[in-house]
Amino acid sequence: MRYYERERREFVRVKAEVPVRYRFLSHDPSFEATGYAEGVTRDVSGGGVLMDILVPDLDWIPGLLTERIFLGVELSLPGEDEPVRALTRAAWVQSDIQKAEQTCTVGLRFKEITRDDLDRVFRYVITRQLA
């Protein structure tokens, strides 16, 4: 089952398996933030990342799509000493309800990211394109 909003691809994407730590966050005081989980991106762009995530509760999917739940991510770009940190929002979520685990593929867009971290992402994407 795929949940999504209209896609507006603005940035070039590169297929890349970049290690990432992520956690679920919300401004809602009743929401209990999770600890960090680890994963790997499928692709990276200047606008965000595509990755598989483990969703603790599939009832969170509407919250992800309506910006009530966000993901804080730390991307470990190759050759970088510090991770790129960003607050992201889900542009779309695809889940396979036939599977027992609650793994979803999610397109994440950067919501809050420093200019320096965004520049590092752009440099990484350009370098990958030229390789």
Image: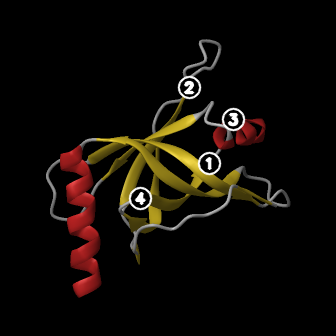
Between the C-alphas of marks 4 and 1, the distance is 22 Å
**Image x and y of residue 49, in percent:** 45, 60
Q: Which residue is mark 2?
A: 26
* SS assignment at label 4: loop
Q: What x and y, as percent, mark residue 96?
A: 78, 61
Q: Marks 2 and 3, Cα distance to the nearest angstrom?
A: 9 Å
Q: Label 2 sits on what residue type?
A: Ser
Instruction: Please tell me which residue is depicted at 40% across the width and 74% down the height of the picture.
Output: 12
Mark-to-mark CA distance, 1 and 3? 15 Å
N-terminal-most mark, 4 or 1: 4
Q: Is residue 83 left or right of residue 10?
A: left
Residue underneath mark 1: 54
Q: Secondary structure at mark 2?
A: loop
In the picture provided, is 99 more to the left or to the right than 117? right
Could you tell me the amino acid type at mark 1? Leu
Task: Decide if residue 119 is in sight here.
Answer: yes
Position of the N terminus, as image quadrant, is bottom right
Q: Distance from label 3 to label 4 (Cα)?
A: 21 Å
